[in-house]
Image: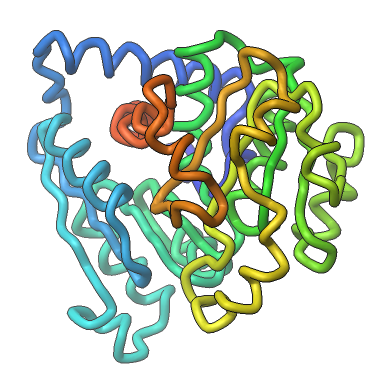
Amino acid sequence: MSATRHFLTLLDFSPQELQQLIQRGIEMKREHRAGKDQRAFPGTSLAMIFSKSSTRTRVSFEAGIAHLGGQAMFLSPQDTQLGRGEPIEDSARVISSMVDIVVIRTFGHDIAQRFAANSKVPVINALTDDYHPCQLLADMQTYVEHRGSIAGKSVCWVGDGNNMCQSYINAARQFDFELRIACPPGFEPKAELLEANSDRVHIEHDPMVAARGCDLLVTDVWASMGQEEEQLERAKQFKPYQINSALMGEAAGDALYMHCLPAHRGEEISAQLMDAPDTVIWDEAENRLHAQKALMETLLLANRA
């Protein structure tokens, strides 16, 4: 039996596999809207281990596994032995002996890695402090649906060099685009990531310069989960880093803008753009469902082989 496949970062799949995932997500979206029965995995159990709060991630995975014919169980630290100090390794061995696939949303990326290393079934990273690869699948699917291939395009990240930004660095490598990161000094992503991808990723502290001619602008909240106490101080430093009509005016004429949500309207993105009739942000949110169904299908089939 081959080694169990996991999806902890975009680098766990080859560029070709990622392209196939995106196309399958688009196909599954079309099938779902046409009312096609997608229950190819009856009796499948999905364990959702969440140490952080969630809306889109929880709903999309629970709905997604139901569409595939399976069922989800939501496990929070308050309800399990994980919250009482059971080693990650022990929990992984036990939980993976009873379910078919695991989704984990936690703090340190090493927690997801340790869980996967001791799991008999596929583990999906549904967000850690370092990466959020499932959101990138949805973002890439959204771009492909609206504009075609993103290969060779220019993308501008506006805001904090957080887990989303770091996943965009991996995406630049895997989907073959240029990434410009517009962030305040001191809020850059990890230096080793920048160095490893210096051929296509650049820091530009002036957002107006960074956005010039870009095909896609992306942002996220200024203070991520666990950083709420820094919100006021960050608001001062990040004030110039807002996606608004002025910044979009610097981008390419057909540029898209995205936000992984939840958004703080009037901070990292203007309310005007959030409510614009041609925004793709709501498509982007819905695509979490379809991209993750394609991902779960791929991992479940691989684990049967």
Q: Position of residue 100 (x, y in %)?
A: 24, 47
Task: Judge whether 229 appears above or below 288 on screen.
Answer: below
Q: Looking at the image, which residue sits at the far bottom?
A: 84
Q: Residue at x 69, y 42 (%)?
A: 157
Task: Judge whether 20 appears above or below 122 on screen.
Answer: above
Q: Position of residue 199 (x, y in %)?
A: 91, 33
Can residue 302 be seen from the camera position used here?
no
Left or right: residue 26 versus residue 127 is: left
In this view, the residue in front, 249 or 147, is: 249
Q: How many marks?
A: 0
Q: Residue at x 57, y 33 (%)?
A: 13
Can residue 156 be seen from the camera position used here?
yes
Coloration mode: rainbow
Q: Position of residue 165 (x, y in %)?
A: 65, 49
Quarter of the figure with residue 40 = top left
Q: Quadrant of the N terminus?
A: top left
In this view, the residue in front, 175 or 178, is: 178
In this view, the residue in front, 9 or 205, is: 205
Left or right: residue 209 versus residue 28 is: right
Q: Position of residue 88 (x, y in %)?
A: 42, 75
In this view, the residue in front, 96 or 104, is: 104
Task: Judge whether 225 appears above or below 246 on screen.
Answer: below
Q: Residue at x 49, y 16 (%)?
A: 20
